[in-house]
């Protein structure tokens, strides 16, 4: 009755208040030790203390596996809460509509859940690869396939980070981190699938530009994307090694 409703409201308020604190902690910088987070070594479990998932009460229990630490656990709590509260309740509706609202992307960006390996100078958190792995796991646990966060954060953003020009990185990466822009990859073709060696789309040099001819299908995030990386052959004689990204 009244007490249960009051307790539920209190719990929701607690979750809402905890999210900004978690983000603040994720973004904090400790200059003396060069650590990015406020968790101190003394607060972390000693080596070997973290349980194997098979020993825990649940395979999805937070705080297991030696490859993760307390900072990863904190991020996992944030990601899990996001999928449970912001995605799962609306997923069936989005599946019927055939698209995920853009507001979900900006909300994920505000929480530091997108493209978090992007270096700090381009608006990211400069985190290690275990953080996106946590996002993959938590999205799979939620059973929600709609949001194409992995393509955006862990394929498109790294391509631009590693191979983009300085102008491209400065212009595009901050918007991918914030979720203001959505990234996609145009690689799969009707007759070649995702086999680079058999891609038929070509890019021919034309002065300072390239003219691209071909067809692409199954472009994850293609419906909503603001940035799309296109795979095309610039040297057909080299097979898969003759493919360039545009």
Image (cartoon, helix red, strand yellow):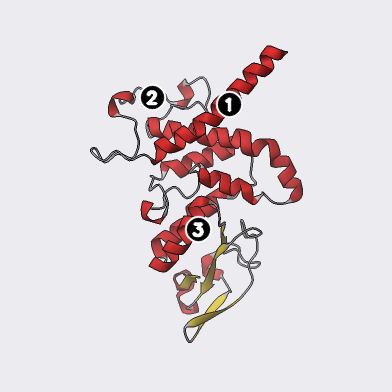
Picture coordinates of residue 237, whole percent (x, y): 47, 79
The residue that mark 2 highlights is 50
Upstream in sequence: badge 2 or badge 3: 2
Mark 1 or mark 3: which comes first in sequence? 1
Residue tagged 1: 13
**Does dot 3 land on a helix, a strand or a loop?**
helix
Left or right, 25 with reference to 104 = left
Choose mark 2 or mark 1, whichever is in front: 1
Is residue 235 visible in the rendered image? The answer is yes
Q: Residue furthest left?
A: 32
The alpha-carbon separation of the residues under discs 1 and 3 comes to 35 Å
Q: Earlier in the sequence, mark 2 or mark 1?
A: 1
Residue 100 in the image: state x and y as whole percent. Answer: 67, 49
Q: Is residue 143 visible?
A: no
Seen at 47% across and 50% down, the residue is 115
The residues bearing labels 2 and 1 have C-alpha atoms spaced at a distance of 30 Å
């Amino acid at each position: 009755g009244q007490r249960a409703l009051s307790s539920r409201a209190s719990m929701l308020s607690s979750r809402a208040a905890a999210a900004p604190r978690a983000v603040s902690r994720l973004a904090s910088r400790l200059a003396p030790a060069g650590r990015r987070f406020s968790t101190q070594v003394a607060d972390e479990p000693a080596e070997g203390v973290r349980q194997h998932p098979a020993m825990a009460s649940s395979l999805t229990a937070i705080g297991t596996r030696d490859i993760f630490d307390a900072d990863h656990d904190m991020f996992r709590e944030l990601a899990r809460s996001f999928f449970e509260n912001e995605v799962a309740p609306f997923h069936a509706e989005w599946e019927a509509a055939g698209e995920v609202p853009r507001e979900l992307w900006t909300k994920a960006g505000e929480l530091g859940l997108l493209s978090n390996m992007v270096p700090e100078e381009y608006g990211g958190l400069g985190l290690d690869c275990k953080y996106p792995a946590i996002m993959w796991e938590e999205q799979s646990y939620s059973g929600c396939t709609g949001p194409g966060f992995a393509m955006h954060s862990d394929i498109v953003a790294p391509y631009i980070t590693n191979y983009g020009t300085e102008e491209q990185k400065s212009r595009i990466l901050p918007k991918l981190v914030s979720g203001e822009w959505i990234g996609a990859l145009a690689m799969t073709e009707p007759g070649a699938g995702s086999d680079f060696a058999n891609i038929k789309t070509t890019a021919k040099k034309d002065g300072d530009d390239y003219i691209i001819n071909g067809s692409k299908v199954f472009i994850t995030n293609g419906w909503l994307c603001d940035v799309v990386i296109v795979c095309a052959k610039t040297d057909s004689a080299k097979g898969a090694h003759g493919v360039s990204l545009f």
